[in-house]
Image (spheres, helix red, strand yellow):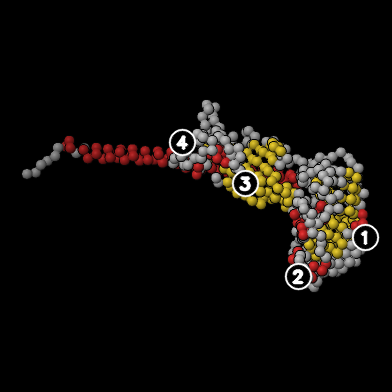
């Protein structure tokens, strides 16, 4: 028997379908809402994570630009807006209000002069970048502290959840509570900033550390950018940390104690003029010259272009009151902290040491000719900057320092340095070395013509425009000078992020 369904039963299937779709839609909407919330939260956290690094690197750049003023504008470093001098070797910077995306990004920096290289300071830059984190105060995992009910309830407590992985601080600064300044000092509980109602503002902090070191100009015994014409003397090398120059025979005796130090007297000629007299115990490069391996112990390359940095006049320094040519300078612990003196011309100088024989540093600017009729006391490190000509006569030059002396600078030659301010082309400077007597010094005068005459010897290093010698003049490169010359600039030698 066939049974017929009533018309009123036909809508039940439709109702079931609508209810199913509604339930699935509610589930989908709930999943989508939660996913969107999580996505927005994660996006904001990622944004804060990246912006914190941008702020840290911005602080590092600001600090590095101040470090470079040690060369370009001595005395003016770490003096701008936001900088505070803690002491003579430590400075801090706080980004002024209103900078950094409407105060949602900030930067604080600590700079330390932690050591020196031949009297040239090296700097550690530690920069902290902080960015606001908007959205829900979540990380997706536990943000508590083991054994404690609330975040950072005790000084020194360290979080254990995903907030550490993402460097998010909801109430207190993770890093300060655990590591203080990064070296374990001043550990304390530091709350995050609050809004106008006193509510904590979540933040992300990232920390970077940079090491800034000087870029030094001495890379070999002699650099002449425009031509080389030597006399008949030997050009060799030694290392003053081992004591005084051991003699010419060392370079030809493999059994000599310091033989390995004697054959690094590298010579660079940036011009096409090359005339060699005596032996050169080192490598030679020229820019189109005709140097051969005859009487040269190292490698020869005649196709090397040469670039040479000019020597600018230092600016921004404060000069001490005018003193006589015989004076005792104010003591300085480095060239960067040493005093500055100014002369229109100088001859017959006598520089005493205010610290006895301990190392002290002084800078002298001469806006004219410089004659090395002078006496420099033991322990005095002096840099002469001059705009005119330089006259050097060994018998009148008394450098009382001693090679191998126990100090940050073991080089006798490195204690007395001459820097010729580069003249405007086509002008040049004349640098004359005449007998009798020997000279122990560093000469950096990229715009000068150096003339070595007679049978005297020069101990140190030379950078000049052209070099010429006659007779049996000897040239002995002190390898320690690579660390003691006045820096041309500063460079970043290390960059790391502190991921603790």
Q: Secondary structure at mark 4?
A: loop
Mark 1 / mark 4, whichever is N-terminal: 4
Do callouts 3 and 1 mark residues in contact (Cβ within 8 Å)? no
Which of these two is toward me, 227 or 276?
276
Q: Which mark is residue 43?
A: none
Q: Position of residue 389 (x, y in %)?
A: 89, 53
Mark 3 / mark 1, whichever is N-terminal: 3
Q: Secondary structure at mark 3?
A: strand
Give the residue pinned by disc 3.
Answer: 209
Give the residue pinned by disc 1.
Answer: 436
Q: Which residue sits at x=87%, y=47%? A: 351
Left or right: 344 as drawn, with respect to 28? right
Q: Position of residue 366 (x, y in %)?
A: 87, 47
Q: Position of residue 181 (x, y in %)?
A: 61, 40
Compute the Cα span from label 4 to label 3. 32 Å
Which of these two is toward me, 414 or 359?
359
Do callouts 4 and 3 mark residues in contact (Cβ within 8 Å)? no
Q: Which mark is residue 255?
A: 2
Whether residue 275 is visible to the viewer of this picture, yes or no, is: no
Q: Which residue sits at x=53%, y=27%? A: 198
Considering every residue shown, the one lying at the far top of the view is 197
Q: Secondary structure at mark 1?
A: loop
């Amino acid at each position: 028997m066939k049974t017929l369904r009533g018309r009123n039963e036909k809508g039940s299937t439709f109702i079931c379908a609508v209810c199913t779709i509604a339930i699935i839609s509610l589930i989908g909407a709930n999943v989508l809402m939660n996913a969107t919330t999580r996505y927005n939260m994660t996006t904001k956290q990622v944004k804060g994570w990246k912006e914190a690094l941008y702020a840290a690197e911005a602080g590092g750049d600001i600090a590095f630009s101040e470090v470079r003023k040690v060369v370009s504008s001595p005395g003016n470093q770490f003096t701008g807006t936001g900088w505070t001098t803690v002491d003579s070797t430590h400075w801090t910077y706080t980004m002024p209000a209103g900078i950094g995306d409407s105060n949602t990004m900030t930067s604080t920096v600590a700079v330390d002069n932690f050591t020196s290289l031949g009297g040239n300071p090296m700097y550690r830059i530690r920069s902290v970048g902080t960015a606001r984190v908007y959205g829900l105060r979540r990380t997706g995992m536990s943000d508590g502290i083991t054994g404690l009910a609330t975040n950072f309830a005790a000084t020194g407590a360290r979080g254990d959840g995903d907030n550490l992985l993402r460097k998010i601080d909801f109430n207190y600064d993770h890093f300060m509570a655990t590591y203080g300044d990064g070296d374990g000092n001043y550990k304390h509980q530091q709350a995050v900033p609050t809004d106008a109602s006193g509510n904590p503002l979540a933040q992300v902090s990232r920390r970077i550390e940079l090491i800034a070191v000087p870029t030094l100009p001495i890379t070999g015994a002699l650099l002449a950018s425009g031509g080389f014409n030597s006399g008949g003397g030997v050009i060799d090398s030694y290392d003053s940390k081992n004591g005084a120059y051991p003699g010419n025979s060392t370079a030809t005796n493999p059994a000599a104690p310091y033989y390995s130090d004697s054959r690094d007297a590298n010579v660079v000629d940036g011009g096409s003029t090359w005339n060699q007299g005596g032996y050169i115990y080192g490598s030679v490069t020229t820019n189109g010259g005709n140097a051969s391996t005859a009487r040269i112990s190292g490698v020869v390359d005649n196709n090397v272009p040469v670039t040479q940095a000019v020597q600018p006049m230092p600016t921004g320094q404060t000069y001490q009151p005018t003193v006589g040519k015989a004076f005792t300078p104010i003591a300085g612990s480095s060239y960067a902290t040493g005093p500055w003196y100014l002369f229109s011309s100088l001859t017959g100088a006598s520089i005493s040491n205010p610290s006895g024989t301990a190392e002290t540093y002084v800078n002298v600017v001469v806006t004219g000719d410089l004659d090395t009729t002078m006496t420099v006391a033991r322990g005095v490190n002096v840099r002469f900057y001059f705009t005119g000509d330089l006259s050097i006569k060994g018998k009148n030059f008394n450098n009382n320092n001693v090679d191998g002396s126990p100090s940050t600078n073991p080089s006798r030659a490195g204690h007395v340095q001459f820097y010729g301010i580069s003249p405007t082309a086509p002008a040049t400077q004349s640098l004359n070395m005449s007998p009798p007597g020997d000279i122990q010094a560093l000469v950096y005068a990229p715009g000068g013509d150096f003339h070595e005459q007679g049978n005297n010897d020069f101990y140190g290093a030379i950078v000049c425009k052209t070099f010429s010698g006659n007779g049996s003049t000897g040239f002995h490169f002190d390898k320690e000078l690579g660390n003691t010359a006045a820096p041309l600039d500063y460079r970043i030698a290390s960059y790391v992020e502190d991921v603790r």
